[in-house]
Image (cartoon, rainbow, N blue to C red):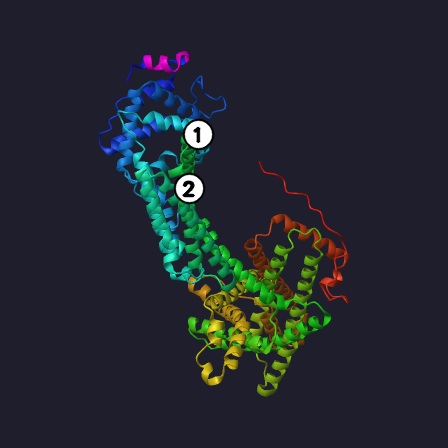
Amino acid sequence: MPDLETFGRTLLPQAANHRALRQLHGHLQGIDPNGPLVDRVAKLDAVLRWVRDTSRVPPLPDGDPGDRAQVGRLRLLVRALEVFPDSAASLGALVGSVLGECNVVDLIARSGLPADRGLFGETMDRLSRSILPEVVDERDLGHLVSRWFGSRRDLGWLETVPPHLVLRLTAALRTPASGNPWVPLAHAAADALSLIAQRVSGVGLYDGIRSRSPRVPVRHSPFFLLPRATDAMLAALIHGDRAALESALADCRGLVRACLETVGAVTHDLEHSGVSVDVVYRLELITKNIERFSVLLERIVEPDPTAHADGAKRLLLQLLLVRKRDRELGGIVRSNMHLLARKIIERAGHTGEHYITTTRGEWAKMLLSAGGGGVLTTGTAALKFLISWGHFAPFVEGVLAGTNYAGSFLLMQFLGFTLATKQPSMTAAALAGSMRSSASETNLSGLVSTIARITRSQLAAAMGNVGAVIPTAFIFDSYYASKTGHSFLDAEAAAYVLHSLHPTHSPTIFFAALTGVLLWISSVGAGWLENWAVYRRLPEAIAEHRIGRFIGRRTTRWASRVFSRNISGIGGNVTLGYLLGMTPIAGKFFGLPLDVRHVTLSAGALTLALCSLGAGALKTPEAWGAMAGIAIIGSLNFGVSFVLALMVALRAREVERRDRLKLLVSVVVTFFKSPGQFIFPPKVPDAVPVHGPVSVPPPPVRH
């Protein structure tokens, strides 16, 4: 190592005493490639900290004026190594010794790739790693690389390093005295290829994936053959057999394409036969591992040195980026739940299509169907009071209340009646499906007509529910009073009902919005249960059950059709019932003032309360406030559940924001020009909006 003056004059004659040169001279002195690993890592860390410094150095004759400060420092380091071979030999030996003793395989073969522990295990592991402190293992190259280049600023300047500079650096460190310090990386890359191939093979031959893959013998499966082709390719590379290498490389690339085609076939099967989060997670695991395998494969066999250096740099950038994302929960949840969410939304949307009326006859049927639901709700409201008067243990009371609600909703389903508040979350999914298929159209008349049909259908259902529950509750109370001599509710209970429904004297507004959330959750439960049944092929199992030998195949096929037609409704009704029944109990358990406000049930309870208090109560402010509360409850029940369902459906179906804005403008214009079709069906079905195509300016470009 020359003295500082010679070092400076040789590299930068115009700035021989520059501070950066003095620092670099100090870092390149006293390198001991045979010292303890901790000392060697510390020395390498000091050199890299000098490179990462943002202070600029005087430009070299071969430098680029547009270089970042770190790239300029890297040029100076490479120049020093090229001019002073002894320094290059010392630093190259240091790099080679550190790489030789560190675990490099995990950095290449595991960083950023999902583990085979499953979605739940991977989620819990990421959560724990994001909260708990980790011990830095000096022998784990992944930890060291994250420490050296862990910030986004480092990713930025590394991206701008030119390939020829990377090639010069790797060549400068490879000297006769130090040997090739990059041999451990090459060996680790080969081991990583074998490890990834084995991982892809094991996951690809998992029963849940193999049963949905194209039917081939296991020995002919691309997942089975990939590790063997990889071993053959690595053997040819080691022995320098060019012909065998080309053949094995072609086999590996063909098997990679075949594996991806199999993943596509399994995904297509899931689209039609129901989604399993476990299978989706494993498909994600296979896809990401194959992507890493392909990158490594091209790096190992790349003959051009400059392209090889550039590919190595890009691989490093990719590893750094995915290591930063290794602790993030959002990415893994989004990537694995997206397909399930879409299938749930699609199944909810398919159910929601039945709630959308087109003709006046269908609108009238919806009104009558909702009237039947309102009649049944009177009994549900009365039974709710009886359960609360029983003073049961909280859990028992919640179960009984949930059973009351769920039983009532199921009875409505099997009798063909309608509960209005179940509709918004279902119809929102159907609307999102229409938006996805019509996103590229400039004339949104069809979508606006769909919204108009949804709106008037919702109004018909709401009018039917509330319009039937009020007279039914009045008739019920009159009959009860004729038999017992007093109203169903006493004065204290009736006064409490009026107070609990008042929008300013009680938390009714919050409870109504919470109920809207529960209504939306019930639609998710309906879609999930139907997806679960379809994924496990329960309709086919029922149709082909062995009991058919005794009762006849026609009967089992009929049962299968009934099951398919009703499983979604059963899931949604049971979920909604127990959510409504158990939410107040959960609030008591946690000490939170939680309750539910369902518009039809509340309207029935208010009618019973007014019957108890007499006609004079209608003139009181409390009664008028409770009536206003019913209107607010209905609006929030419908609005919150519809908005939540629409947001999730739009995201699951990947509808662009610009398309949403176009639709909003189109709906507003149509409503002000022709509000009648949003309330009552026109004479001509599917009336076209009275405006032309709506033009929306593109969103501003973000720089």
Q: Is residue 655 above or below residue 496?
A: above
Q: Residue at x 31, y 29 (%)?
A: 44
**Kind of residue indicated by mark 1:** Pro
Q: Secondary structure at mark 2?
A: helix
Q: Which mark is residue 639?
A: none
Left or right of residue 687, residue 398 in this image: left
Query: Label 2 crowding class (10 Å Cα cut-off): few <14, some 14-19, many 20+?
Result: some
In the picture, which quadrant includes the C terminus? Answer: top right
Amino acid at the residue labelled 2: Val
First to last magenta residue range:
6-14
| SS assignment for the magenta stretch, majority | helix
- Residue 471, by quadrant, is bottom right
Q: Is residue 273 left or right of residue 463?
A: left
Q: Which residue is mark 2?
A: 295
Using the image as rendered, state which of residue 638 and residue 84 is in the foreground.
84
- The answer to whether residue 686 is seen in the rendering is yes
Query: In the figure, 128 relative to 158: above or below?
Result: below
Extreme-bottom residue of the structure = 483
The residue singled out by tag 1 in the image is: 163
Rendered location of residue 382, percent (x, y): 55, 77
Q: Is residue 235 above or below residue 665?
A: above
Element at badge 1?
helix
Q: CA distance from mark 2 to mark 1?
A: 17 Å
Within 10 angstroms of label 1, few (less than 14), some, or many (20 or more) residues?
A: some
Counting from the top left corner in percent of width and height, residue 580 is at 51, 68
Q: Quadrant of the N terminus?
A: top left
- Give the mark, 2 or 1, whose residue is nearer the N terminus: 1
Pick the front one: 590 or 200: 200
**In this rendering, position of residue 155 left or right of residue 370:** left
Residue 41 visible within the image: no
Task: Look at 57% across and 86% down and name the residue there.
Answer: 484
